[in-house]
Amino acid sequence: MDLMREFDLHNPRALARAISRAEAGRGGELIRALYPKTGRATTVGLTGPPGVGKSTLASALVREARSRGRSVGVVSVDPSSPFSHGALLGDRIRLAEHFTDESVFIRSMASRGHLGGLAGATADAVLLMDAFGFDLVLIETVGVGQSEVAIAELAQTTIVALQPGSGDSIQVLKAGIMEIADIFVVNKADHPMADQLRREIRSMMEMLQWSGWVPELVMTQAVDGKGVDELVAAIERHRAYLSETGEVERRRRDAFRHQVRQLALGRMERRLDRALRAQPRDGLDPYEAADRVLSELGLEG
Amino acid sequence: MDLMREFDLHNPRALARAISRAEAGRGGELIRALYPKTGRATTVGLTGPPGVGKSTLASALVREARSRGRSVGVVSVDPSSPFSHGALLGDRIRLAEHFTDESVFIRSMASRGHLGGLAGATADAVLLMDAFGFDLVLIETVGVGQSEVAIAELAQTTIVALQPGSGDSIQVLKAGIMEIADIFVVNKADHPMADQLRREIRSMMEMLQWSGWVPELVMTQAVDGKGVDELVAAIERHRAYLSETGEVERRRRDAFRHQVRQLALGRMERRLDRALRAQPRDGLDPYEAADRVLSELGLEG
């Protein structure tokens, strides 16, 4: 296969095309061929509410990784991110340094459409970047709702970014995101309410039981690069923890299982939708109608 | 069945217990029995980012409906809502007038856990409130991510609330929420940037093609009740449009189909998870593993 050869020759366009294929739901053949080459990259997820400065943080992390000679792939599934199509011009300019760096590959995923489909394509993109040979794969996603749960299943280390003086950050904490964070970042640490947010996170953490890794809390001002070295150190401490305890293997298995589940579920959904379209279910209540369609698919009980 | 008799006797505790049963995934029998009594209620969805004042708007809508002698059921699927468990004391006090009104029934849905499961339980709760005899069922949900799409499938009229001077509102618009709004509300209309947000919504609306109903835009200050009468008038205009065009039937069919799909999908997921747990898939790539599990379920192709 031509694309495959180009991929092996380390042509970034081949990677871009491979991801497009995955986005179109036709990534299976490539992933199957490339799967043996995966498992080398460090995968880091970065999530948080809109406006928290995720893209500035991501950009700072990319810069830091590059200064250590590591190559970086970024998968952005945040529709509001400047990495994505909805970029504001100013943000794009800020990121321009990375756009021209050959050891950095930035890819935004189409955020419309189906959650399962997007999650599947995101998982494929991470595997493709891993197989392509990037040392670090950074997955950026807007963290409200269910998407942050998916990121935690894909990434070995999950960073939850919050900002002071915004009700959103507290809402995000309440919405069940505490449990997925390996590292909390309070960005915009120069804000007068930064210390209050830090205390709130600490007190919320005290309400949970932790076994093993206890999330670290890092204060950053990503726009000036302040605290980013400390964030990188925290990521490395978490990575060391994962290796020492063997949990890195568990997380890899979880990511695998998660992707298998998403793939199978996506195909089941397509089967279901075909069956639902095939005939109307007038006069039935929804439970009866669901029973019927499942039995048509051979899935009783 | 005892619960069924109590339900028929219009005991609100029976409704509460019925919804709890639905939340536990055991609502099928009740829904099947009560389904013929549904289809009478007006269903209105209210969504928007955290902090926009959704609960104040919801409270104002409840008050307005009550002043017209209509009974109201509220289903809150917003983890940050004062209707839900995460309530701040001040918010609860503001809503206290409704808590003691027998023609108002407020129910928050557990927001943790599975998206499909929550959507299914929400759909059940709406049907149960409808069957119980509420004139208006208001579904409140936090509007970032996928949940707002689900609300649009459940509700006949969907209100998207935004606030001025917050980047979030623009992000929400970008994230594909434009298409689901029947009515836009700019709350906190006394904010200096309210007019700018109004213009932004207008200009984003111009980029879309509308056939049939064109979303209305209402400015409110829900905290003082300002603009709420205009919002109610807009809801009634939309309702009249739905009736006159017959679209109310189409929306009811869509809601039905949506619920059937969610129910069937939920059961398929449980089947899938059992099959995935049953055996490890070491040494396979994710696509191969997904093929295997589907064929084990009798769902090839």
Image (cartoon, coloured by chain):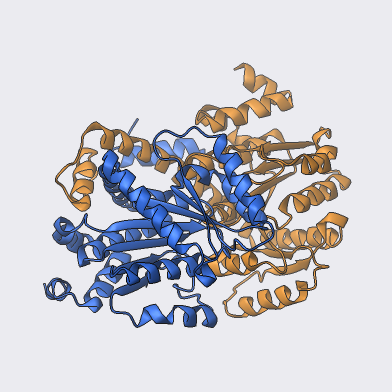
Chain colours: A orange, B blue
Q: Is residue A170 left or right of residue A118?
A: right
Given residues A214 and A244, the one toward you in this image is A214
Task: Identify the residue at horizontal 79%, vertical 61% (top origin).
Answer: A231
Residue A242: image quadrant is: bottom right
Residue A246: horizontal and vertical position, in percent? 63, 59
In the rendered picture of this protein, how many numbered marks are placed on residues? 0
Q: Is residue A67 left or right of residue B63?
A: right
Pick out the residue farthest to the top: A2
Given residues B298 and B281, the one toward you in this image is B298
Given residues B272 and A198, the one toward you in this image is A198
Q: Relative to B282, does residue A227 appear above or below in the rendering?
A: below
Task: Identify the residue at horizontal 46%, vertical 52% (top origin).
Answer: B148
Residue A282: horizontal and vertical position, in percent? 17, 42
Residue A171: image quadrant is: bottom right
From where the camera sits, is residue B26 visible? no
Task: Identify the residue at horizontal 76%, vertical 71% (top origin).
Answer: A194
Given residues B229 and B109, the one toward you in this image is B229
Residue B76: horizontal and vertical position, in percent? 41, 66
Residue B133: image quadrant is: bottom left
